[in-house]
Image (cartoon, rainbow, N blue to C red):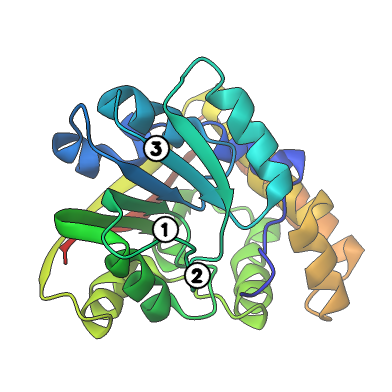
Amino acid sequence: MPAYTHGHHTTVLSSHQWRTVENSAAYLIEHLRPGLSVLDVGCGPGTITAGLAERVAPGRVVAADSAETVLDEARKSTAALDNVEFAVADVHALDFPDDTFDIVHAHQVLQHVADPVQALREMRRVTRPGGVVAARDADFGTMIWYPRPPAMDAWLPVYYKVARGNGGEPDAGRRLVSWARAAGFTDVTASASAWCYATPDEREWWSESWGGRLSNSAVADQAVAGGHATREELQKIYAGWKEWAAAEDGWYSVTHGEILCRP
């Protein structure tokens, strides 16, 4: 499994901790009911996990991530719940028996893994007959914003180089159906939804998350190490993000692909 491109800098976790079932897994809500068992793959700091656990309680939820350190954050997010367990896991080779869970969920995971088709095969393997495999991933090629400060233009080309250099695929959203069919699913329901940031507070937060990520996080370190940008160039990109955030008519959107798959 490749290194997680974003790392776990505070600029990254601030974005992850904003995510909820409502804003990041609404396509799955109608399939959640009390008593179901859920595996949340790549749970990160656990804010989506908490919402899943509340909806399926007293059903069992396993929060799994490849990084033990981020599971500590997930434990904090779910501390008030008594139906959540934690596991360090590689989605390419899940350490669970066949047919274990009713729902296996992954949010913003498949874009980062070395073999998303194998990951979906594993997610399928541990899902019970009649269960659901659910995945949602951003598609970076759909990211649009206004206004467009020239200093901000370089951020996506730099990020593509870093992410693909790690074996990931930033345009994962559009590929989810293809990956699911390659993994052996024949019953696949596809949908799409978007995040939008337009208020002053949203713009400031989003610019610090992504502009700051290109300035301070593992993304920045890998961009420099890979020869994709200098520190000075990354600071210019950050300045472009802040210029966008300061615009009274600033607007940003990113589309996500979503799949619900029946084994």
Residue 106: % across, % down: 40, 54
Residue matched to label 3: 61
Q: Residues within 10 Å of mark 3 (few under 14, many from 20)?
A: many
* Image quarter hosting the C terminus: bottom left
Q: Residue at x 50, y 75 (%)?
A: 169
Residue matched to label 1: 138
Q: Are marks 1 and 2 in contact (CB under 8 Å)?
A: yes
Q: Residue at x 67, y 64 (%)?
A: 5
Q: Residues within 10 Å of mark 2 (few under 14, many from 20)?
A: many
Per the image, label 3 sits on a secondary structure element best described as strand
Residue 157: % across, % down: 62, 73
Q: Quadrant of residue 110?
A: bottom left
The disc labelled 1 sits on which kind of residue? Answer: Ala
Of label 3 and label 1, which has the lower sequence position? 3
Residue matched to label 2: 170
Give how far apart the Cα atoms at labels 3 and 1 are: 24 Å
The disc labelled 3 sits on which kind of residue? Answer: Val
Residue 258: % across, % down: 27, 57
* Image quarter hosting the N terminus: bottom right
Vertical order, 173 against 59 (above or below): below
Vertical order, 13 against 260 (above or below): above
Q: How many marks?
A: 3
Q: Residue at x 34, y 32 (%)?
A: 52
Q: Residue furthest bottom?
A: 182
Q: Is residue 245 visible?
A: no
Q: Is residue 202 visible?
A: yes
Of label 2 and label 3, which has the lower sequence position? 3
